[in-house]
Amino acid sequence: MTVQIACIGGAVLDLVYGVDRLPGEDGKTRALSYFETGGGMAANAAVTIARLGGSAAWWGRLGGDDKGARVLEGLKQDQVNIDTVRIVDDAISSHSLVLSDRAGNRAIVLYRSDALDPDPAWLPLHAVATLNAVLADNRWIEGAVATLSAARQAGIPAVLDADAGADPRTVEAVRCASHAVFSEPGLAEIYNTNDPAEGLRRAAADAPFVAVTLGSRGVRWLKRGGEIQSLPAFPVRAIETVGAGDVFHGAFAFALANSMSEEEGLRFSAAAAALKCASEGGRISFPDRVAVDRLLRDLQKGNLY
């Protein structure tokens, strides 16, 4: 069975510059490489799901400009359904400037138009019950709350990708999710603590399952009423980390939709994200199911997990 998953939230056009080192304040540096790629948390998650063999749709908003057209064309090429998209003619589509250095560090400047209508009334929430899971990011809170709530009512996984630098109302979306997976900066920002363990305990009051990705330090998670558990990071030489978190979240939604347990899903997602980090080129480096399963088998033979 091919699982069907809708991803709700952001889609952007990423302008990615490869540099030797990220410049400091008032600094300047020369780009060693440049490419354009589709980005955005929910959109990248949808591409990940399609690459892994799922049926993915992106639900979101774009401006009626060339950037938006390029974003949609990229999603279409990556086999993502784009039938549920609202085009706002007088808005500029979201886009970002990304600096990525040789060590895998990055700096991102994102532009998001205030003209994108936040009203989610046009979303086909009646269709959620026909899906196997939904994923929402915290770039469009109204859309996230509406869709995650519909998914919970339908009894399917409702996954929230909660990153930093987003809407302060993110906690509203956390309360609607069955599974909330935070970046480390996102958890710290939303729950006002730099201690990931304390952040998870606070978040567990709002969602049944919470997790935080910690980069090279792996993943920690907590089921409400349980104990905090950890999964170490996969051994990988990071070449490009842009989009790795989105791959993780998309793979996690895919895993849950395929009836994997949360722990199995986190391990599967960590493998997918590690493979993405080991290659460059934006979405070109998103792994397929064969590559993820091979890595998991190889690591199991080495008794790393």
Image: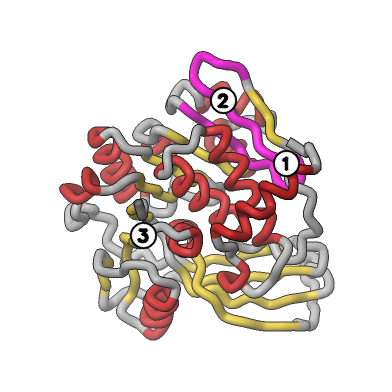
- Mark 2 surroundings within 10 Å by alpha-carbon count, few (fewer than 14), some (14 through 19), many (20 or more): many
Residue 257 lies in the magenta-colored region: no
The residue that disc 3 covers is: 55
- Mark 3 surroundings within 10 Å by alpha-carbon count, few (fewer than 14), some (14 through 19), many (20 or more): many
Where is residue 88? Give x, y as percent: 26, 72
Q: Is residue 215 left or right of residue 179?
A: right
Name the residue type under label 2: Leu
Question: SS at mark 3?
Answer: strand
Between disc 2 and disc 3, whose residue precedes?
Answer: 3
Give the colour scheme of this rendering.
secondary structure
Question: SS at mark 2?
Answer: strand
Answer above or below: position of 148 versus 53. Answer: above
Residue range in magenta is 209-227
Where is residue 194? Give x, y as percent: 68, 33
Q: Looking at the image, which is closer to me, 27 or 224?
A: 224
Name the residue type under label 1: Gln
The residue that disc 2 covers is: 222
Where is residue 290? Give x, y as percent: 58, 59
